[in-house]
Image (cartoon, rainbow, N blue to C red):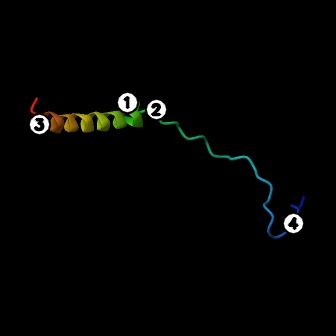
């Protein structure tokens, strides 16, 4: 049986993939969560700013 000709500019019908699915990576835990890193950065910035506030007002 011959395959039907596909007009130029049209996408041929898709066939199912014959490759196997990739293995999903395990969750990296705490190290891949951006809110952890944002909170570490914000906490560091607050501590540095408090250092200068205490130094200015002589506490």
**Secondary structure at numbered mark 4:** loop
Residue at position x 22%, y 34% from top? 47
Judged left or right of residue 27, residue 51 is left
Q: Count neighbours of disc 2 (C-alpha within 10 A) and say few if under 14, some if 14 to 19, many if 20 or more.
A: few
Q: Which numbered mark, 3 or 4, is in the foreground of this view? A: 3
Q: Given this view, does label 1 or label 3 mark the residue nearer the observer?
A: 3
Q: Along the horizontal axis of the image, is 57 left or right of 46?
A: left
Q: Residue 26 has which mark? A: 2
- Residue at left offset 55%, top offset 41%: 22
Q: Are marks 1 and 2 in contact (CB under 8 Å)?
A: no
Q: Nearer the viewer, residue 53 or 12?
A: 53
Look at mark 1 in the image and give the residue it sits on: 30
Picture quarter with the C terminus: top left
What distance separates the C-alpha of mark 4 from that of mark 1?
Answer: 54 Å
- In the displayed structure, 16 sits above or below 1; it is above
Identity of the residue furthest to the left in this view = 58
Please tell me in which quadrant of the rendered image residue 50 appears.
top left
Estimate the spatial distance between the alpha carbons at disc 3 and disc 4, rounded to whole Å. Answer: 81 Å
Q: Earlier in the sequence, mark 2 or mark 3?
A: 2
C-alpha distance separating marks 1 and 3: 35 Å
Q: Position of residue 36 (x, y in %)?
A: 36, 32
Please rate how many residues cluster around mark 3, counting C-alpha atoms within 10 Å: few if below 14, some from 14 to 19, many from 20. few
| Helix, strand or loop at mark 1 | helix
């Amino acid at each position: 049986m011959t395959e039907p000709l596909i007009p130029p500019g049209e996408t041929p019908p898709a066939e199912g993939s014959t490759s196997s699915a990739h293995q999903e990576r395990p969750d990296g835990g705490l190290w891949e969560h951006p809110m952890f890193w944002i909170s570490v950065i914000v906490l560091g910035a607050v501590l540095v700013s408090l250092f200068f506030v205490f130094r200015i007002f002589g506490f």
